[in-house]
Amino acid sequence: MPSDNIVRAIRTKTQKQLLPSVPARWRKQLGFGLQAYGLRSFQSASGNARMVGNNSHTAIRRAERLFQNTRLTGQLGTVFDSFGLVKPGSYVNVDHSDMNGLMALVGAVQTRKGRAIPCMVEATYSDRLSALKDAPARRRLLRRVRNEARRTQSFTGHVIDSLQDFHDRLGFWPRLVFDRGFGNESIVTHLQAEGAIFYIRLKSGRYVQFDGQKIEVKALGERDATVQLYGLTLCQATFKMNTLS
């Protein structure tokens, strides 16, 4: 389908299916989100926000309010699911985007047509908030709120809960593709126990167990290999890994 027709079809779906399902009080937020993230390549949460409007600071604040509106996020997730774009065999890219004190966990389904489509957005407080007393007032406030939130849920716990909610919403696990930074024991163990198929980029200097010996990933080269990590048996292939079925 020519690109103009693709954009026209997306706008038609937006007008006929998406906007009517959203309460009027949220439509301006949704409009901003579509401009910033819906029809342009995803660079980062803050970078995309700056592309909308002339005032960079205002754009970032609008993005923060959008990501913090969990009720809208949940409703849009349900509407997106009705499009049926994410299937059990789909590949969903998952990554973090740090944005002015907030951290967005974003999932985007690969389309094989040159553009991944966001299908999951969850926000939490960044762990990079300054502890200095002379930090900006808003950063100090966010840090206090973040510290309180971390009493009941860790950052990793937020990621796991968000992924599990994504699964529960769909009713299945798509194939999850993670960048570096997601390969910690809790996430890997949870996904393996759930029977999910997932891929995580590992740093070349990361150590794994191979043939009973501790070895760096880069020493495995680009060959497929069965390795052990966190006591789990995993398949390493071209610096990516997934659970064995």
Image: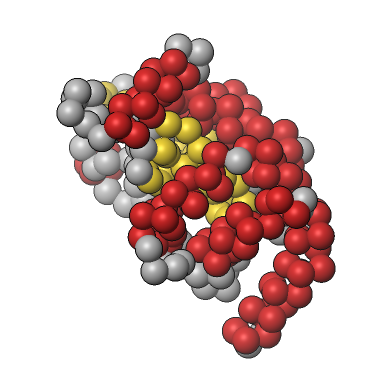
59 sits left or right of 87 in the view? left
Quadrant of residue 133 in the image?
Answer: top left
x and y percentages locating residue 184 in the rendered image: 39, 27
Q: Quadrant of the N terminus?
A: bottom right
Q: Where 140 falls versus 204 (above or below)?
A: above
**Front-lying residue, 229 or 153:** 153
Quadrant of residue 100 in the image?
Answer: top left
Residue that extends furthest to the top in the rendered view of this protein: 151
x and y percentages locating residue 173 in the rendered image: 66, 40
**Front-lying residue, 167 or 237:** 167
Number of dots carrying numbers: 0
Q: Quadrant of the C terminus?
A: top right
**Front-lying residue, 54 or 182:** 54
Is residue 226 visible to us here? no
The residue depicted at 43 percent of the width and 61 percent of the height is 48
**Front-lying residue, 215 or 114:** 114
The residue depicted at 71 percent of the width and 50 percent of the height is 25
x and y percentages locating residue 156 in the rendered image: 45, 25
Q: Where 152 falls versus 226 (above or below)?
A: above
8 sits left or right of 220 in the view? right
